[in-house]
Image (cartoon, rainbow, N blue to C red):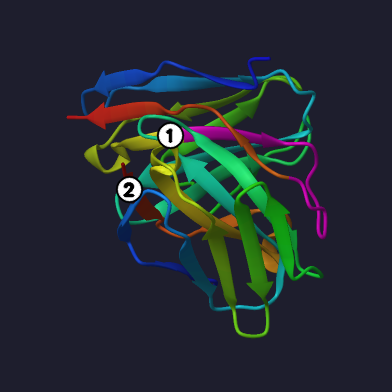
Amino acid sequence: NAGVTQTPKFQVLKTGQSMTLQCAQDMNHNSMYWYRQDPGMGLRLIYYSASEGTTDKGEVPNGYNVSRLNKREFSLRLESAAPSQTSVYFCASSEAWGQGYNSPLHFGNGTRLTVT
Amino acid sequence: KQEVTQIPAALSVPEGENLVLNCSFTDSAIYNLQWFRQDPGKGLTSLLLIQSSQREQTSGRLNASLDKSSGRSTLYIAASQPGDSATYLCAVAIMEYGNKLVFGAGTILRVKS
């Protein structure tokens, strides 16, 4: 059971370059999320998709775009990378989303991105 | 704005010791609180989820408690083992944003053999 799979695992970009981080889950989950993790700051939500066909901004969406391609896949795109986007990016999924719904998150192993 | 704080930032204990990790949050309007484990270079693994109506959850040697009124949660690890060495993060699902989580920065635990 693969769970949540992220590609690539590592990436180095130059300022201004673009790239797409890929995420896929095989647990038939409805909701998917993108977080970034920076030292000493915990994880911060970038974008989320409560269900197939919907996406919404999280806490730190500036400089990113997302696409919920289908129920399994949720991609994160950096259109013009900046050094401030150097971070570890995690994709996560949960069975459902909604007020009061208690659904644990399942995380991928992350993409370590460096922007020079 | 909800803020989640974890104390201590790092902890080193000898094998076999019982230990407590602390998590505090500023807004008691939460749906649930979750504890995660993160191994170096890996993603997060969900350990325990406590619903807002619950006081505690147990899984094996782990016990997590929740006191919403005081904005606190503790993760108790019994008879610690070197394999417990990892970063432990807590996160709260805040009512303002549905099931989205606000994370603490984590406690780095090292269990010495």
Picture coordinates of residue B3, whole percent (x, y): 49, 71
Q: Is residue A50 left or right of residue B2?
A: right
Q: Are dots 1 and 2 on a single chain? A: no
Q: Quadrant of residue B67?
A: bottom right
Q: Is residue A37 left or right of residue B34?
A: left
Residue drawn at (51%, 28%) of the image: A76
Q: Is residue B94 left or right of residue B112?
A: right
Q: Chain of mark 1?
A: A
Residue drawn at (41%, 40%) of the image: A63
Q: Is residue A88 left or right of residue A3?
A: left
Picture coordinates of residue B51, whole percent (x, y): 77, 62
Figure check: B113 above or below B75: above
Q: In this rendering, which labeled residue sits more in front, label 1 or label 2? A: 2
| Count of numbered marks | 2
Question: Viewer-proximal residue, A39 or B64?
Answer: B64
Tell me if mark 2 has few (under 14), some (14-19) or many (20+) residues whose alpha carbon lies within 10 angstroms of its own.
many
Query: Magenta stretch containing residue A67, yes or no?
Result: no
Q: Which residues are magenta?
A: A90-103
Q: Is residue A103 visible?
A: yes
Q: Chain of mark 2?
A: B
Q: Which residue is mark 2?
A: B110
Picture coordinates of residue B82, whole percent (x, y): 38, 40
Query: Magenta stretch containing residue A97, yes or no?
Result: yes
The residue positioned farthest toward the left in the image shown:
A116
Q: Is residue A79 visible?
A: no
Question: What is the number of the mark on residue A89?
Answer: 1
Q: Amino acid at mark 2?
A: Arg
Q: Amino acid at mark 1?
A: Tyr
Question: Viewer-proximal residue, A8 or B55?
Answer: B55
The residue positioned farthest toward the front in the image shown:
B16
